[in-house]
Every structure is written in structure tokens, then in C-alpha cells.
Image: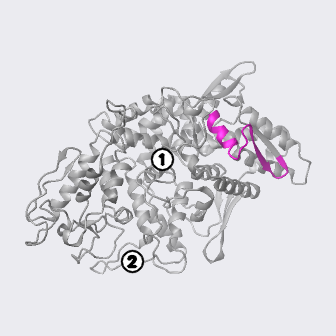
Amino acid sequence: MRYLRSLVCGYRGYSASSVLFIGTIVVLFSSSSSCYGGTFEAESRGDVRRIRSDLRAAQFLSKATFGPTQEMIDTLSNRIRQVGYRRACGEWIDQQFALPASSHEQVARDMVAADGRTLTEAGIGIANYRYQAWWHISLTREDQLRQKVAWALSQIFVIGDSGTGFNNNTARNIGNEELSLPDWLGMSNYYDMLVNHADGNYRDILGDVTFHECMGVYLSAYRNRKADLTKGRWPDENYAREIMQLFSIGLYELKQDGRLKVNEQGELIPTYDNEGITELARLFTGFKSKHNTSTSFYAGRNFGAPMQMHHQEHDNNKGYSDVIGEPGYGDNVGSKTLFGTTLNALPDPLTNEAALAEVNEGLDVIAAHPNVPPFICRLLIQRLVKSNPSRGYTRRVTRKFRDNGQGVRGDMKAVIKAILLDPEAIRGQRALRKQEPLRVEVVTRGTEHSRLREPIQRVTSLIRALRPSSNYPKSDSETGVPYMALTGYLRDDLGQMPFRAPSVFNFYVPDYQPPGELIGYRPSQRIPREALFAPEFQVMTAVTSNRLMNRFSYWTRNRYVRYTMRDGVQLTISFDLTPELELAKDNANLPEILRRFDLLLCNGSLSEETKTSIINAITSESTAENQNEIRLEEVLLAVLVSPDCAIEE
């Protein structure tokens, strides 16, 4: 934690401290502080139990949701005291996965209809509804865990909406008087596929990702044709490369605890070579859009249905031509071989059914590769819990991926449970009971147990924690809650935005390391690669850091999030801070206000040094007519921008 906090604190060159300007207040946060979080005074042993269960509940929910609310913390905390942490959180996971899955496509459709628009209306930025639906679901819907897992999966099976026609309002005739899904809704349809698979099976995800037309268009598998020597054409290798490098096995062979394997010369062992890419590219050929009546390979796009097979353009193993007299005819190249496994021979003549069966057989081979469990599990742990899972943590989760206890490989629900319920998931901080006076002290355990919070998570956590309400004139038909719809333009401030990854490599790479030497800290042998990684720091640039802080400043000072929607209408998501405003009338209540914000936004990791700095800065201000409001706004902002809040234990 010291290392990560010093990076946050010293980002602009302040090696000893970070200087945060809050109006006329200057608050100093030392980067050389001890690893102690907050102190919570208790009146009895029962109060100690409640405080400790509150902290555990907040810590768990910060990883399993888009931000805990006080009600969620209270409910889970109470259950923890009744049956224990592991059982209570296991029950919570089961309850979450039993909830109906919120559909991004449906919410976007409902919002369009509520606004009196049509799905193909031009000139209104129709694609913005895609982002607004995502924000509304993340901020208000009950199936938080499923949505959080889908967000993690979307950063593994990455697609982006720029440059590929995903923002068009076009819907095409696909025969029998049916229109295709409008292009802009395709990515919502893709995201819903990940939502529905959050408790499914990895092999099913891999298959549906492969056949989804959005992925096909994004990574060139769509209308990928078999080779034709007469035209100098070869199958596109883009998807073949990325399905291995990013969606399944990675670049180098791994041990089941996440360590990299080496050969006798001490060199890393590649999982595939260029020949392997070329061979696999032959498999992903012949994909076209689903159409009710047309059999053409070039039927118009249809992002709402899985791609279909056009066997005439699928590599048939006969050679590079099946036309007598053409170059390559009769040069039987044989069945495709993937990772040493030769796929079944194709029939002659080839059929759509046989070509599809071959693709699925190839996907089976990929999904069965021994690298898949440690590779995918590490990525999921990074997105849900921490940047540097230990060898033991990785091994335990990987074991559950290989076999869920009932002989099933790739059971996502079992994997997610293993990740969130593992002891290491909450080992980043301890809540210790202390005497004289009776209290609970939070002790954070250091860099290897922490990560920088994603900008998206910092925003959703803030809004969800502050009892939000929206002035959107229409309400969610499912919940009755007015829509809380933020804008996709926040990407420039956050460095990330759903559906808007800058490349297939996501917003940040899993092995990203901030520049500069790691002074005064040596990673333990528990870490698989003997090096520390901090992926989220890749989007923490001078620009995004400044813009995010400006956003926080604006939102806290006004106690709302506001932006101008289409037609010049202003949407406002207001924060209800009535109880805290009452407390803010007296400086003696500042510790209680900080305790509340600490629990909701920092999970108890706000250090006493930080709290003292905030209180001293606040109380040094001169009295004003609306001093209680200013006092509360500045306390909230100081908590938000503190390194203690930016770093998640």
C-alpha cells in the first residue's frame, strides 16, 4: 500500500506528500505514513463485533458491486454476525446470481421509447442511449454482482465502438418483413451476452464471443474467407491471434499458480507461434450475417444474431481451391491441427453443419488448454479484487476453474465464488480490537494486497453511496426509479468508458508497471512473477487525474452530478446528505462524518493521519453563513481525493 499510495501522492513529483487544494484549504497527505487505517471507537464488545462486521461487509461489497450502500452494508453485516463471514457472503453471492439479469439492450430500448424517440432516429446521437443504459443499471439495478462480473469480462473479451459502424442508427431488412437490430444496439446485445454468462461456463462464453457479429466485425472474423492463391488471398489472422493471446491462453506457458514456465535454458516458453496463428486462422473462415431468406455471403449486417456459416468460404482442408484447374486444387493440406490436436476430417462435399462442428471442435481444444485456468483466473482476480494475486490465491481459484467439485470445467459461478470468498480477498486489511479505550483499529497490509480503484468504480461508488435521486422525467419500468443516465463523454475525464476501450488490449494491460524504480520495497516470494503490477495506473495520467479531480470537486461542491442531455435538457442526479448536513453544524461531529464516508468510500482504510489533516484544515476556515454546507462538501471532497480512498485494500 505504501508504494501505491506514494505513486498516487507523488504522481506530479511530490515524493514526500501530495498537496490537494480544496478551495482555500490545503490538505497534506504524507506518503510515508504507517500502514494503519481508521480507528473506530466502540462502547461495548457487541459494538466491536458490529464495527468489524460492518468493515468486512463494506470491503466485500466494494469488490462485488459497483459500490456499497449503507443499507447493503447493514444487511450483510447483520448476516455476518449471525452466521459468519464466509457463509453470509456465500449466501449473498447465491442470492445475487438468482436475480433476473438486467438487460442493457432492453433498458436502452425503454429509454428511447420513454423519450418518445425511435430506435433508428437520426440526428440525436442515438448511440448515447447505450452508455446511459449502462450507467443506469450500474447505479440502480439490484443484480450488482452479475453486472460487476460482466464488467470484468468485458475487459477480457474486449470490443470497442469506434471506427467499425457500431454507432449507426441503421436497421436492415433481413427477410420475412423483419428488421435487424439497429447497429448502435449491437454492443449492448454483446454486453448482455456477457451478463448472462456471468454465472455460466467459460467454454460457452468463448463460443458466444466467437460467433457474435460485433466481435466478428471488430476482429475481422466476419466475412473471413478461405485462401485463394489466384488472388493472393489468405484468411485474416486477427481473431485467431487475439483469441489465443487475450481470450484464453496468453503468450507464454504458465504453471497453475500463475508462474511462468521456462525451458532448460531458462527461457520463457511461447504458447504458440506464427504457424499456429496461420493454422487457427483457417478455422475462423466462412462467417456471415444471419438472414431469413438470403443465402448470400454478403447479406447485410445483423448485430442481433450469432453469425452463420457459409461453408463455401470455409477452409475445407482440400487445398486452396476446390475448382478443377485452379492453383492449389488437389493439394490436400489435411485436417487442421491446434496445439498438437488434429481436428476431425471434413466431409466432401462440405456442409454448413460440418463446418460449424469443426469450429466448435477447435474452440473445445482451445478451452481445454492447460494455460486457460491460470490465465483467465488471474485476469478476473485483477478486475475484481487485487492487482497481484499470490501463487496460493491463483492456485486455489485455478483449481476451482479446472473442476468445480462436480467434474465441471470452467464453471464461472464457482470461479467467482472462489475469487470473492478466498481468504486473500479480504486480507488487505485487518480489524483489530483494542482496549483502553475500547476500539477497533484497521491495519492495512501493504502493496501486494491492494490496487488502484478504477475511475469508473470511483464514480459509481460515490453516487451509489450518497442516496442519489434523479430528475429524469421518465422512470425505469422495471423498478419505478427515474433513470440515472450519465454520458459517454466522461471517457475523457476517466480514461475509460464501457464500450469504448481504445484497443483490444483494454484500457490497461494486466502487466503494466508505472515508470520509475520501486524504491524501498521488494516483492515477496508469494507473488508468481517476482514483480508488482498496477494496471489501473496506465490510465492515471496527468490529464485524467486532473480532470477526474475537477469532476469530483464540481460534484461535491454542488452535491449533484449534472450534464446537458439531448434537446438541451439538464439531467441532475442529486445526493441526499441531509443527515450529514445536520451533523456538519457542529465541528465536534466531523469525526462521525468522516467515519461514515470512510466506511462507504474507503472500507475503513482512511488513516487517522488523513482524518486529522482533514479536520485541521476544515476547522481552520473562517465561519460563514452556510459554513455547515461548505464544511460537509469539503470533507467529502477531501476523502474522495485522498490516497487512502484511491487505493483499495
Residue hosting label 2: 171
**What's the mark number on residue 522?**
none
| Horizontal arrangement in the rendering, residue 272 relative to residue 608 (left or right) | left
Picture colour scheme? one colour
Q: Which residues are magenta?
A: 1-25
Q: Nearer the viewer, residue 514 or 344?
A: 514
Q: Amino acid at mark 1?
A: Leu
Is 6 inside the magenta-drawn segment? yes
**What x and y, as percent, mark residue 181?**
38, 72
Q: Position of residue 199 (x, y in %)?
A: 38, 46
Q: Earlier in the sequence, mark 1 or mark 2?
A: 1
Quarter that holds the N terminus: top right
| Residue nearest the observer in this picture, 565 or 574 | 565
Q: Pointer 1: what residue?
A: 145
* Quarter-of-image position of residue 284: bottom left
Q: Residue furthest top?
A: 436
Q: Is residue 201 visible?
A: no
